[in-house]
Image: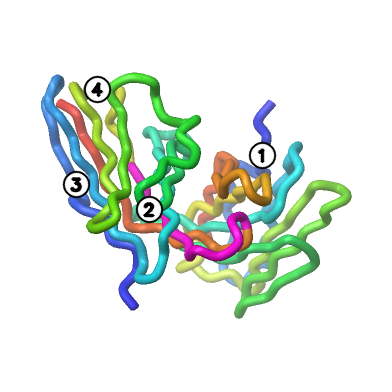
Amino acid sequence: NAGVMQNPRHLVRRRGQEARLRCSPMKGHSHVYWYRQLPEEGLKFMVYLQKENIIDESGMPKERFSAEFPKEGPSILRIQQVVRGDSAAYFCASSPPSLAGKDTQYFGPGTRLTVL
Amino acid sequence: KNEVEQSPQNLTAQEGEFITINCSYSVGISALHWLQQHPGGGIVSLFMLSSGKKKHGRLIATINIQEKHSSLHITASHPRDSAVYICAVRSGETSGSRLTFGEGTQLTVNP
């Protein structure tokens, strides 16, 4: 059973470009979470999704950021018109579809975004 | 004040020493996680606790729900234990499983 997969592992973008980060949860997992780790800072929650639904996006910046988890395919975190302050490590985690709040979250290796 | 506070921020130990990292939180929780982040950046979940104590190899995690406090212990520490250890809490049973993280404890174990 492959773990949580994220790609790309490293992404370099120039200011104003778009960044697309992908997360494939563990097999059988239907809950996906995105977290951001800014340089020299702790992890911060961004968004929690289930298949085709955004459950909690209270940690997402109001502009330029969006997330989806379609019925088929990976979850996508999309950042439009990137700025230098978006440079960070973005981690995805997944958990299985049992009682929310009762299961371990399994983390992917992260995508390190660098905005030039 | 952060909802999750860890201490110490940095810890240096000699190989073989017993290590304790503390975590205090200020909100009601459904579970507490201890995570390990290696120098390469990957994150591994060590424990999920809602009560009592868990042990895995040389690692022991305890939680006191009444005092809102958890500890992570490492016995017979080894240089390969050098990493950042992160405490994270999950609040709410059904409103989503978002985690709130402490700032992490940087552990360095010298040979």
Mark sitting on residue A84: 4
Q: Disc 4 vs disc 1: Cβ atoms closer than 8 Å? A: no
Name the secondary structure under disc 2: loop
Position of A49 relative to B83 (above/below): above
Name the secondary structure under disc 3: strand
Q: Please name the residue that numbered disc 3 is placed on.
A: A10
User: What separation in Å lies between label 4 and label 1 (alpha carbons)?
Assistant: 28 Å
Residue situated in front as seen by the camera: B31 or A68: A68
Q: Percent x, y for residue A68? A: 31, 42
Q: Are the numbered discs 1 and 2 placed on the same chain, yes or no?
A: no
Estimate how packed mark 1 is, as few (under 14), some (14 to 19) or many (20 or more) residues with alpha carbons within 10 Å.
many
Position of A105 relative to B104 (above/below): below
Q: Disc 1 vs disc 2: Cβ atoms closer than 8 Å? A: no
Name the secondary structure under disc 4: helix
Q: Quadrant of the C terminus of chain A?
A: top left
Residue situated in front as seen by the camera: B19 or B62: B62
User: What separation in Å lies between label 2 and label 3 (alpha carbons)?
Assistant: 26 Å
Residue A17 quadrant: top left
Subunit ID for the residue under disc 1: B
Q: Percent x, y for residue A33? A: 43, 48
Q: Is residue A46 magenta?
A: no
Subunit ID for the residue under disc 4: A
User: What separation in Å lies between label 3 and label 4 (alpha carbons)?
Assistant: 15 Å
Q: Amino acid at mark 3?
A: His
Position of A55 relative to A70 (above/below): above
Q: Disc 2 vs disc 3: Cβ atoms closer than 8 Å? A: no
Mark sitting on residue A51: 2
Subunit ID for the residue under disc 3: A
Estimate how packed mark 2 is, as few (under 14), some (14 to 19) or many (20 or more) residues with alpha carbons within 10 Å.
some
Estimate how packed mark 3 is, as few (under 14), some (14 to 19) or many (20 or more) residues with alpha carbons within 10 Å.
few
Q: Disc 1 vs disc 3: Cβ atoms closer than 8 Å? A: no
